[in-house]
Image (cartoon, rainbow, N blue to C red):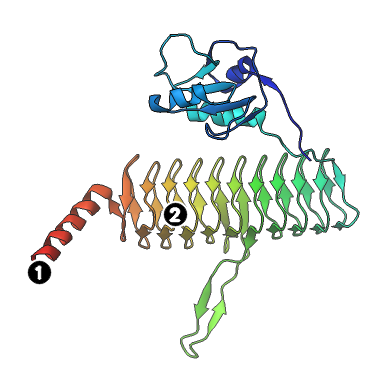
Amino acid sequence: MTGVIKRSVQEIAEYAGARVVGDGAVELLGIASIRSAAPGDLVFVDDETNLQPALESRASAVVAGEFVTSQTYPKPLLLSAQPKLVFSRAAQLLSAKPLRKPGVHPSVMVHLPQRLGDGVTIDERVVIAADVEVGDGTWIGAGCVIGRGAIIGRNCELYPHVTIYPGVRLGDRVIVHSGAVLGSDGFGYVRDRASGRYEKFPQVGRLEIEDDVEIGANTTIDRGALDVTRIRRGTKIDNLVHVGHNCDIGEDVVIAAQTGFSGSITIGKHAVLGGQVGIGEHARIEEGVLLGGQSGVLPNKVLRGKGVAFWGTPAKPVREYLKELAVLARLARKE
């Protein structure tokens, strides 16, 4: 079940950090694309070519960039140098959210003692082991399994069938999508040279996830082998990502789908990793580095350069990589 929230254009502008041109009292009900907009919807444009189609749409208001002139428009405008950001913030106020009734479903298997905060919602068939702590306002979806001693912060959202291993710590406002597995054993083995057999190296460390992290569906994050795997504040991880043991992912990092991390990798804050990136063990990606899709980083490699884009395998600055591709193309034409 969802609730509809009406907000005025002025109210949204104040929340999102935009200025209003036109009637700020117009009420909005939701967000939409220009093509699918209906009365009551808010749309956005980030270039001047799309402004006229937005004004001619059925939407009631438009978020636009500072390219807009001072003339009169048929709809109220919310102007900002970052229209997409303003639109995203507006969505937080306008998007209909599930109306969850706090409480514990009768089918939940709860092992006391533990601490459940105020306003916690736990859906059907959840299993919670002993000594678990759940902060105020957190929602745990159907079929989740929470291991012994795990700590989940305030206002977290765990979608159905998330598995959290014992001792994992989640900060506040963490979102974990369906099928994610947090705190599983790392892939660590020791080979007996005499017999050729592999024996498991201890995987007894921790996993700590800080505030405002979002983790995509079917992503897996291993606990540390002896120490800690850490996902720092504000990082966003897409679906089907694997993070190995002892990794340290910095603040506000963005990681796209199907990226894989070996063990003991360090990622600096504000790094951006495209889809299907592979990184070898003990590599270090420093602050602000951009890694293009399907790039490969060799073990122990260090990539540095804030705002520098790397691409290819082994990953190198994109200009260098493209020059090498051009040389290869010329050589192929000569044959």
* Mark 1 crowdedness (10 Å alpha carbons): few <14, some 14-19, many ≥20: few
Task: Work out which residue is located at the far left of the displayed protein and give it.
Answer: 334
Q: Quadrant of the N terminus?
A: top right
- Which residue carries the number 1 mark? 335
Q: In the rendering, at what x and y percent does residue 116 appear?
A: 83, 45
Q: In the rendering, at what x and y percent does residue 34 appear?
A: 52, 31
Amino acid at circle 1: Glu
Precedes in sequence: disc 1 or disc 2: 2
Amino acid at circle 2: Gly
Q: Nearer the viewer, residue 248 or 103?
A: 103
Residue 125 position by quadrant = bottom right
Q: Is residue 67 above or below residue 184?
A: above
Q: In the rendering, at what x and y percent does residue 296 appear?
A: 36, 60
Q: Is residue 228 above or below residue 61?
A: below
Q: Which of marks 1 and 2 is in front?
A: 1
- Name the residue: 54% across, 20% down: 17
SS for callout 2: loop
SS for callout 1: loop
Q: In the rendering, at what x and y percent does residue 239 appear?
A: 56, 54
Q: In this view, does 245 lie to the left or right of 129?
A: left
Q: Which mark is residue 275?
A: 2
